[in-house]
Amino acid sequence: MHNLLVLFIQDGKVVKKFLPDLRYNEAAQEGNLKEWVSGDFTLDPGTYTVYAFANIDTYYDGQWGSLTGLEENASIPNDVNIDNIVLDDPATKLNFAEGKFIPMSAKEKVTVTSSTRNISIGLDRLVSKIRMSSIGKADTKVTALSFGGYADKIGLFSDTPVNNISYDGEYSVVENGESPVQLTNDGTYQFADFYVNSSPANAGYKVTL
């Protein structure tokens, strides 16, 4: 994680908010913070919807500024519908050198009782790393290789409705007509990692070689 926002919402109001200052956390600045612990806090018994977001900023969606600006005990504005936020092609916006890391999100219903001591939330990545390799004969050359079939947009959560979604995205690993890739002497080649928008499991991908 590079940045983090956690909201506890009940009856349309922000009951608890965490927006930790991670500017001086070395792991966070490198996008490598794996866990953040809030410390002790108190909630009344009841059911809450917990939203957590990491590595998301206004360059992914303009409503992000509205979410970070929410204060505790404030009502969610009518023009901010967290459950319906859709990110448009976030994979193309990644730039690790500029601190634009993989966006992540989570939504979970939690019930707090007098015996509740810990609440743990795991975040899902909205952009996936792809690592491709080729195995063949030592004298084989790869003249064209592409990876396609991934979504052009993705909702913040698995149940977010996404309209007019397209699966025509394609990434050229080896551009046809450019210098071919020669497999190594043992008949293998590891291509450089790249990133695509996460897509439903039933959508499938297309590899053209």
Image (cartoon, rainbow, N blue to C red):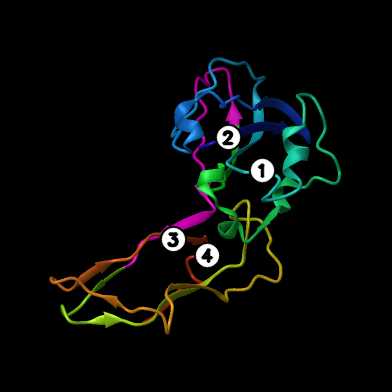
First along the sequence among labels 2 and 4: 2
The CA distance from mark 1 to mark 3 is 21 Å
The CA distance from mark 2 to mark 3 is 22 Å
Discs 1/4, front: 1
Q: What are the residue bounds of the magenta stretch?
A: 111-132
The CA distance from mark 2 to mark 1 is 9 Å
Q: Which residue is mark 1?
A: 57
Q: How many marks?
A: 4
Tag 2 and tag 1, C-beta contact below 8 Å: yes
The CA distance from mark 3 to mark 4 is 18 Å
What label sits on residue 200 in the rendered view? 4
What label sits on residue 3 in the rendered view? 2
Q: Secondary structure at mark 1?
A: loop
Q: Nearer the viewer, residue 209 or 48?
A: 209
Q: Which residue is mark 3?
A: 194
Discs 2/4, front: 2
The quarter of the picture where the C terminus appears is bottom left
